[in-house]
Every structure is written in structure tokens, then in C-alpha cells.
Image (cartoon, grey):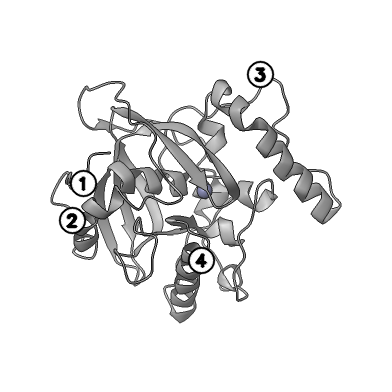
Amino acid sequence: MASGTCFIQSSSLSYALLPFLYRRTTLLSTNLRQLHSFSSKSLTTKSPLMKVFAQARRFSPKQVEIASTDDILFESPLKIVKYPDPILRAGNKRIGTFDENLKKLVFEMFDIMYKTDGIGLSAPQVGMNIRLMVFNPAGERGVGEEIVLINPRVQKYSRKMVLFDEGCLSFPGIYAGVQRPESVKVDAQDITGENFSVDLSRLPARVFQHEFDHLQGTLFFDRMTEEVVDSIREELQALEKKYEDRTGFPSPEKIGTSKARKVVTGFGRS
Ligand SMILES: [Zn+2]
């Protein structure tokens, strides 16, 4: 990824995001941590943004349900939920209450994200099935800007796709290539419940899409080609075995060896 490239695509950013997107550009190239680039291959170069059509299949009624106070209760310290825990595949409720408890949860999510060397984290990854994500591509408290997106919705994806090596805190030590649109236009609410729009590109767009997938119950290997999955199959199976040993239950999903794996295609909005 070229350093010094401006991530801004339009002027529709909320003021809160501007400092992050302008200032982090040089740092991103040297401090990618959990999400590190190995290649960035342009596959198409047609119109920069295209409308998202009816690709909302994963947007089930369950996901639009509003979270109750109980749904947002959490225990400190938070713990990272690892694959194949079914929490990662469950529906995630919209947040309707923007209170002190939510602020505390966001603070603790950043805390565990930094401690585990992540640059992005979604609520289901800490056992909370609600539509919330945090990220800071600098990966350090006090460095870069902390981004909080609540009830995010994707308005547009770029037609241009890029291949990029991703990691995930729910899959410790596993990195592999995932192809995604290079940029994305997002609507969301901030920690006070205020609506804002933002156009993300490059690393912030990559982190956002990875975390947004978590809110849809989609995991990064769902988007990998069979060839790429083959390269991490044993590591995924090792996580499944670990889950079985820890819980005494059979793994709720198995990557297996078959070619019949369901591959997620398209990028839906929510
Ligand atoms: Zn992840």
C-alpha cells in the first residue's frame, strides 16, 4: 500500500473521522499489525462506486431487532471469542440506547483490541451480539484515532476489488488473502447516537468490511477461494479441535476437506 495516499473520497465525513483519516496515512504503511498487506492487486478499474442492489439476503428480521438493556450487559474483562464459537454466527441486534454502559463497553473493546494487537474488533467477537464495531489502524491507545461505528449500513461499494492479507483476533495466528472492494460508503451512528456518513478507502475500508462481515455472521474464510482456504485448512481444524477439547461439545461447524463449502459471494448492505 502506498503511504501518503489520501483515503478521503468525498467531503461527507463527520468531523470526528477527519483527523484519523488524514493523519494516519503514513503510519498505516509501517504499523499494520493484525491486518498486514502482502499484495494489493487491482482487478478492475471501472467506475469508482456502484450502487448496491438487492444483495441483502443476510439481513434477516432477527438482525433488525433492537437490543434490550440485557443484550448490552457485559462482564469485565472482556474475552475474545474464537472460531468456531457459534456466537460468531449468531444474528446481531441493532443498538437503540446510547448510554454510559455502551461507552464503557466501547472503552473495554478498545482495551482488549490493543492488548491482543488488533486494529479492529466487532462486538460479537467479545460475546456481544449487537451491531457495534471499533477500530484504530494505528493499533495503539493514544496513537491514531479511535473509530466507533454503531448500526453501520453500507450504501455503496467500489467496483474495484483488491486482494489483501487479513488476520482476525478470533483466528489467532491465521493470515490469508481476501478479495474485497477497495472502497465503501457507510452510514452509521456514533457513540452519542448521531448519524453520520463516511467514505472509506484502502486500509480503513478493509478493516471496516472485515468487521462489518462479523456483524452479518460472515467470517473471513467464507470469502476466501478454495485454494486459499487449503493453505489454512489445518489451522482452522486445529481451532475446531481446541474448541471441542475446551467445551466437550462437537464443533458447531467444520471446515472439512470437501469442495462443497459454501462461499459467500457479493457484498450486501444492512
Ligand atoms: Zn475478525
Q: Earlier in the sequence, mark 3 or mark 4?
A: 4
Q: Which residue is tagged 4?
A: 115
Is there CB contact under 8 Å for labels 2 and 3? no
Q: Is residue 230 above or below residue 209?
A: above
Frontmost of labels 2 and 4 is: 4
Is there CB contact under 8 Å for labels 3 and 4? no
- Identified at 42% across, 52% down, the residue is 33
3D distance between C-alphas at marks 3 and 1: 38 Å
Q: State the image quarter where residue 159 is shown.
A: top left
Is there CB contact under 8 Å for labels 2 and 4? no
3D distance between C-alphas at marks 3 and 4: 37 Å
Is there CB contact under 8 Å for labels 4 and 1? no
Q: Is residue 175 above or below residue 8?
A: above
3D distance between C-alphas at marks 2 and 4: 25 Å
Q: Of helix, strand and loop, which one carries label 1? A: loop
| 263 lies left or right of 161 | right
| 94 lies left or right of 4 | right
3D distance between C-alphas at marks 2 and 1: 7 Å
Q: Which residue is tagged 1?
A: 7
3D distance between C-alphas at marks 4 and 1: 27 Å
The residue sitting at the right extreme is 248
Q: Of helix, strand and loop, which one carries label 3? A: loop
Which amino acid, by three-letter code, is at mark 1? Answer: Phe
- Identified at 56% across, 21% down, the residue is 227
Q: Which residue is tagged 2?
A: 22
Q: Quadrant of the C terminus?
A: top left
- Identified at 72% across, 37% down, the residue is 237
